[in-house]
Image (spheres, rainbow, N blue to C red):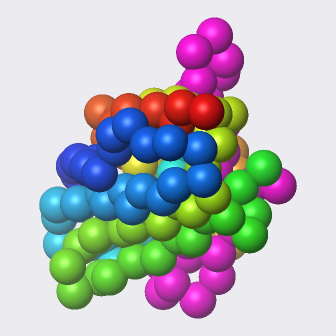
Amino acid sequence: QVQLVESGGGSVQAGGSLRLACAASGRTFSGYRMGWFRQAPGKEREFVAAISASGGRTYYSDSVKDRFTISRDNAKNTVYLQMNSLNPEDTAVYYCAAGRDYTWEIYNRRGSYAFWGQGTHVTVSS
């Protein structure tokens, strides 16, 4: 069992930056791929970014590529999402997710992640 707790959300003006963190419990954190998803008002939850168990591979949605950076510190059992150049379209609840890093699982699918945090709110004003 893996428990995930997000932090770092808040309100920021367009063009600003936020750094989200996801703290994970459990002995097997280093064996899990980690992902970030978000859900904006009135929309379905969508993929944002993911990182492999080793941290050697990262994946991003087209909407955040070149603006967001995902990273992990296995020694701290924590995954981060650095968000730069934020715009109002980034306003959403951001969720951290963890899944076993099987090669046949697709990184941008919700079904590839078995464990989810409660989410942290991000609001970007223009």
Q: Residue at the spot x=18%, y=72% of the render? A: 27
Q: Residue furthest top?
A: 42
Q: Position of residue 121 (x, y in %)?
A: 38, 33
Q: Residue 22's spot in the image, x, y percent?
A: 30, 57
Q: Is residue 42 above or below residue 37?
A: above
Q: Is residue 79 left or right of residue 78?
A: right
Quarter occupied by the C terminus: top right
Q: Is residue 92 visible?
A: yes
Write down the quadrant of residue 75 in the picture.
Answer: bottom left
- The magenta span reads 38-62
Q: Residue at x 59, y 24 (%)?
A: 40
Q: Where in the figure is residue 4, as x and y percent of width and height? A: 26, 50
40 is within the stretch colored magenta: yes
Q: Residue at x 54, y 32 (%)?
A: 125
Looking at the rendered structure, the number of numbered marks drawn on it comes to 0
Rendered view: 21 above or below 43: below
Image point (48%, 58%), residue name: 17
List the single residue furthest toward the right.
Answer: 62
Q: Position of residue 98 (x, y in %)?
A: 42, 55
Q: Is residue 118 left or right of residue 19?
A: left
Residue 37 drawn in magenta: no
| Residue 104 visible somewhere in the drawing | no
Pick the front one: 12 or 44: 12
Q: Quadrant of residue 77?
A: bottom left
51 to the left or right of 123? right
Say which of 57 and 1 sits in front: 57
